[in-house]
Image: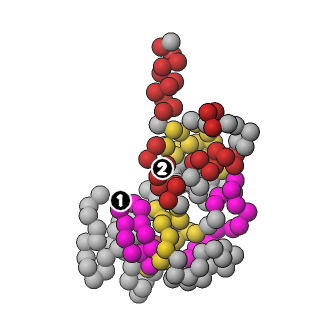
């Protein structure tokens, strides 16, 4: 992905994944899906909020909440959040630092219904919420979850899944 910002006077909304979600007349402001977790983790309904983009790397960005978010009070106006701009072109999505740390090790197969290839929760948080009876050594390397955007189904696969599968075939 090319280096951004390309234009110092209008830096972030020119990013190809942010441009469709820019707020007209509000330079570097975009609409972001904010939430307290997906359906497995939080009962609070996601919202869409205006965010001023302040930085980014690849498809992950920093921004400042430009409005209060009712119903998700921990997200006060002025909070710095992280968000990703999904490959499917849907609206940017709030993520946690843990999500960004874990994300490179997982393949998220796009939702069968809406095509979203990101999760509302870090894989470790989803595993804890979905399989509370499992010990740390039994962490699943492939599991299905509920899409935070539409309630469809997403398949989440760890990097180690294929390798260990091949090893057991050879044995
Ligand atoms: Zn979906």
Look at mark 1 in the image and give the residue it sits on: 58
| 134 relative to 93, above or below | above
Residue 119 found in image quarter? bottom right
Q: What stretch of residues is rendered in magenta?
A: 37-63
Q: Does residue 65 lie above or below 45 as drawn?
A: below
Residue 18 visible, this angle: yes
How many neighbours does mark 1 have within 10 angstroms: few (below 14), some (14-19), or many (20 or more)?
Answer: few
Q: How far apart are marks 1 and 2 (CA)?
A: 13 Å
Q: Is mark 1 on a helix, strand or loop?
A: loop
Compare residues 101 and 168 and report the one nearer the observer.
101
Image location (x, y in percent) of residue 116: 53, 54
Measured as percent of width and height from the top left, residue 94 is found at 53, 65
Q: Residue at x 31, y 80 (%)?
A: 10
Q: Which of 111 and 103 is in front in this view?
A: 103
Residue at the extreme front? 136
Residue placed at 49% from the left, 49% from the top? 102
Task: Tell me the residue that label 2 is attached to.
Answer: 103
Mark 2 CB lies closer than 8 A to ligand 1: no
Q: Assess disc 2: are there few (<14), some (14-19) or many (≥20) residues with their C-alpha within 10 Å of its C-alpha.
A: some
Give the x, y percent position of residue 22. Answer: 43, 76
């Amino acid at each position: 992905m090319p280096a951004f910002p390309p234009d110092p006077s209008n830096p972030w909304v020119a990013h190809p994944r942010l441009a469709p979600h820019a707020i007209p007349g509000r330079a570097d402001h975009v609409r972001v899906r904010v939430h307290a977790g997906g359906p497995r983790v939080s009962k609070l309904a996601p919202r869409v909020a205006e965010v001023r983009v302040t930085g980014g790397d690849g498809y992950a960005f920093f921004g400042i909440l430009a409005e209060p978010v009712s119903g998700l009070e921990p997200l006060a106006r002025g909070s710095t959040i992280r968000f990703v701009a999904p490959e499917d072109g849907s609206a940017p999505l709030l993520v946690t630092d843990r999500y960004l740390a874990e994300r490179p090790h997982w393949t998220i197969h796009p939702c069968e219904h809406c095509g979203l290839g990101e999760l509302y929760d870090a894989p470790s948080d989803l595993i804890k919420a979905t399989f509370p009876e499992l010990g740390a050594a039994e962490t699943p390397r492939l599991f299905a979850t509920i899409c935070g955007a539409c309630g469809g189904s997403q398949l989440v696969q760890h990097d180690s899944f294929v390798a260990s599968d091949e090893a057991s075939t050879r044995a």
